[in-house]
Image (tube, rainbow, N blue to C red):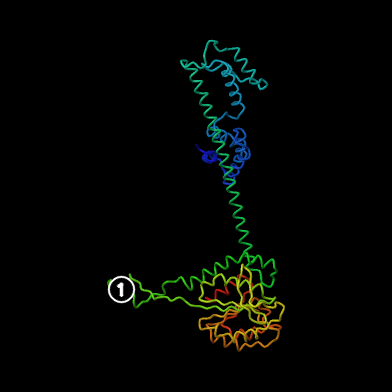
Amino acid sequence: MIGLRDAILDLITDLRTAGVRISVAESLDAMRAVAAAGIERRRMREALAAALIKEEADRGVFEEIFERRFGGAPTNQGDSRRSRGERAGMHGSSSGPSESSMSVAAPEGRDDEATAGAAAKRKPSPPDRDLTDPQDPSSQSENENRAGAGTSEASVGATGESGAESIEQGEAGAVGETEAQGIEAGRAAAMRAIELTPFGNYSDIEYDAARDALTALKRRFRIRASRRLRLASVGRIDFRRTIRASLQHGGALGDLRFRARRPRHIDLLILADVSGSVKYASTLMLEIVSGAAACFRRVRSFVYIDRLAEASFEEGHLAMTPPLDLYSRSDFGRVLAELWDRRAALVSRATVIVIMGDGRNNRHPARADLLRDLVRFSRGALWLIPEPQARWNSGDSAIRQYARQCSALVPCENLHELERGLARIL
């Protein structure tokens, strides 16, 4: 059985074929109008006409096509009078058209009951006639018409109900899909806003929002590290071996030979300043790196203010061993001295040193010479600085001395720049 939605679409198609201009928006309005007005034929006809017909000249075409698609009595006044006459004639003889249906329509003031009564007086039905007699062809015809009318009404009713349910389900699905798209767009916009918020503007609220958005960053960094360090099974094409193999096939380069790719072994040594000015950036960086620790051969993470403490994440919280005094004054020169004393266990030729901090040590000795010697023993040093560039080398900042000894000095004022800075490790 054709659903009500398909029937309305067929009606719109017929109207367009007949020359009535109907846009897509008006078609959607027609669906919504039927859903609001209901499936009763008269109300549905008026709802469709209000949504689809813009010119009075097209109303006749609409009435004709609507009657053909949905059945029912015509809607103009003459048709209504003929319909009243036919209903009145049904109370008379069933063997042919009644006088009331053959004559001129009754005046508007006369109702259907009066017309039907007059027709019954003029031509009463034979009293000895059985309307259900199977031998009477007229009664058979009348019964078939009644059965057909009942079936048609039942079909239209069932079609209307199923069509209404289909429209309601379609509108509910469209609303749900629109809401889901809006929620997804809002989530993406919030994620983008968090990624671009400077660390200097962070409070506990912004930090919690960044922690919620950190899942995607951790996944992207882990996937990138896996592709660069673990997943590649072959290296570049070995042209010498490929040409030798092609001699067996008449010189056709159909058997490519590749160089074996050895996994890159990188050890990470993380030094993160957790003093008040950069604590949010350092904590987020440590959490991102911890999510990709399995991609590296060895990862050692330390936090510092005026001395070193080993760092780890336990149930999503940063743990320091031993605990640091968060109100102490920064002294990176002292931290470098401690690191130099432990260099044999922490630094090798495969170690990449990653430092997160603003380079401020309260005018204590910078000890940049120790950083230079540590870089010589390692693969390189990458300094991530979350402070705005306008504040570099101002006040007690010694970043200029440290930058000379590092392989790269990378600004990372927000999460987006921090992700790009960590990608340079690979």
Coordinates of residue 293 in the picture (x, y in percent): 54, 72
Image vertical order of residue 108 relative to residue 59, above or below: above
The image quadrant of residue 395 is: bottom right
Query: In front: 271, or 261?
Result: 271
Image vertical order of residue 222 relative to residue 369, above or below: above
Query: In front: 388, or 100?
Result: 388
Q: Does residue 353 appear anywhere in the picture?
A: yes
Badge 1: few (under 14), some or many (20 or more) residues near its Cα, within 10 Å?
A: some
Coordinates of residue 335 in the picture (x, y in percent): 64, 84
Query: In front: 425, or 96?
Result: 425
Name the residue carrying label 1. Answer: 246
Image vertical order of residue 63 relative to residue 289, above or below: above
Mark 1 residue element: helix
Tell me the amino acid under the disc marked 1.
Ser
Coordinates of residue 396 in the picture (x, y in percent): 70, 84
Q: Is residue 207 left or right of residue 69?
A: right
Q: Does residue 387 appear anywhere in the picture?
A: no
